Image: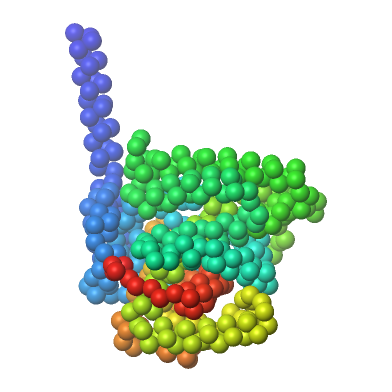
Amino acid sequence: MQPLTNFFQDYTFLLFTSFFFLLLPFLQWWHHHNHKKLPPGSMGWPYLGETLKLYTQNPNSFFSNRQNRYGDIFKTNILGCPCVMISSPEAARTVLVTQAHLFKATYPPSKERLIGPEAVFFQQGAYHSMLKRLVQASFLPSTIKHSVSQVEQIVIKMVPSWTNKTINTLHEMKKYAFEVAAISAFGEIKELEMEEIRELYRCLEKGYNSYPLHLPGTSYWKAMKARKHLNESIRRIIERRKVESSKYGGGLLGVLLQARSSPSRSRSTSSRSSSCGEEKKVFMELTDSQVADNLIGVIFAAHDTTASALTWVLKYLHDNSNLLEAVTREQEGIRSKLAMENRGLSWDDTRQMPFTNRVIQETLRSASILSFTFREAVTDVELEGYTIPKGWKVLPLFRSIHHSAHFFPHPEKFDPSRFEVPPRPNTYMPFGNGVHSCPGSELAKLELLVLLHHLTLSYRFLFITSI
């Protein structure tokens, strides 16, 4: 009888623990629903939340339907995370700028693992400040103005390959954006190294945009394997740079390697915070893993969103022939100047394209490539009369703000002339806002301007399918 008794005891324990773990998400869900002063909205099913609805619906419809029903601040649950969505410019400024210390930058853990937990986007305090200074050093106008000829050469080499062909526009724009992002990240890099990174990144991107199911054979599982191999590839490039160059080469990689090798910098394991509000100059020796996380993070930030913007600007110009003609006339004026002076595009030339720039501004508003960004409340926060519990995600919905008729009359109309006057503060945030705003915004605009210069002057294009 003793073995049978032990069996029933073990079986009862197993049933109890299974029931507890099944019940735990429901208890969390119940707690969220009963937390005082929570924003209105639905948390969906326990554990699953509204994730399946988001993945099976048009994301724009998902957010706009809830905004219409609940208002500018509402709650939901996505990817296992209780979230508060905000579409008020004032509330967005509070989260991203004035009270930014109460909200840390974050992504769902599944996304963060693929980019790398030490990437600048996920950091706070002194460590973030140090990383951002280093990243910005690679993307300031004073730095990227020297990259115009490199970007132009990529375009000159790439565009003729499209002649008399039907191409997948987004796919080709991703190739272009990746080449520019890789040069910005690595500087000069051997073709074999570039090809390896390109293939691994392609696998990583597929997993990033898939449902995060970490089981053998899934896109996410393959992406995690590719991420590990990317770390190894970057480590080998670092070792080669150490041997071949005392200056560690160019790009962000060169900046990061020089920063960690400087004798005036010493490692500080407590550099993520400062005490008593005192400003402390923090120096840290970056590990290979930290360097890899930030290189991959920069490529992520500079690749997918820029490729989408490039695709949309071509779509809008195709659909608005009068605007295409106006852009072409402006670029013809630039071409005449270049012919007279017998040279290629320069940074100053790109500053002399006001109409083309307004077309790009309107593209970024209308398409709203960065539809929202993730923050996490580091403590219970009061926001416009509601309580946001500690640990909840907060998502400023840039697309909702950009498409509000209160700030942009007739938002469905593609109208670059609306940017002849500056938009109302905090209503136009194509690159985010605050300390975690995109440091590569000027590079992205440069890519758009250089491509439009060559494409509008030399080619006619026809879209045969809609985006």
Residue furthest to the top: 1
Q: Position of residue 420 (x, y in %)?
A: 47, 91
- 153 and 231: which one is in front? 153
Q: Of 115 and 375, which appears nearest the observer?
A: 115
Q: Looking at the rendering, which quadrant does residue 373 occupy? A: bottom left
Establish if 226 lies above or below 32. above
Between residue 465 and residue 239, name the one nearer to us. Answer: 465
What residue is drawn where x is 69% and y is 57%?
Answer: 250
Query: As displayed, is residue 285 above or below residue 417?
Result: above
Image quadrant where one finds the C terminus: bottom left
Q: Farthest residue to the right: give it.
A: 263
Can see residue 409?
yes
Residue 226 lies left or right of residue 87; in this view the side is right
Q: Quadrant of residue 351?
A: bottom right
Decide if residue 103 is in sight here: no
From this view, report whether residue 173 is shown above or below residue 287.
below
Number of numbered discs present?
0
Q: Is residue 257 left or right of residue 386?
A: right
Q: Residue at x 39, y 66 (%)?
A: 164
- Quadrant location, the N terminus: top left
Q: Looking at this view, is 430 or 73 the one in front?
A: 430
Left or right of 34, for residue 445: right
Going 38% across and 63% down the picture, which residue do you hit?
Answer: 165
Colour scheme: rainbow
Q: Horizontal and vertical percent for residue 294?
A: 58, 53
Q: Position of residue 275 (x, y in %)?
A: 65, 59
Which residue lies at the image location 32% right of the left edge and 56% below the top edge?
Answer: 78
Residue 204 in the image, given as x and y percentages of width and height: 44, 48
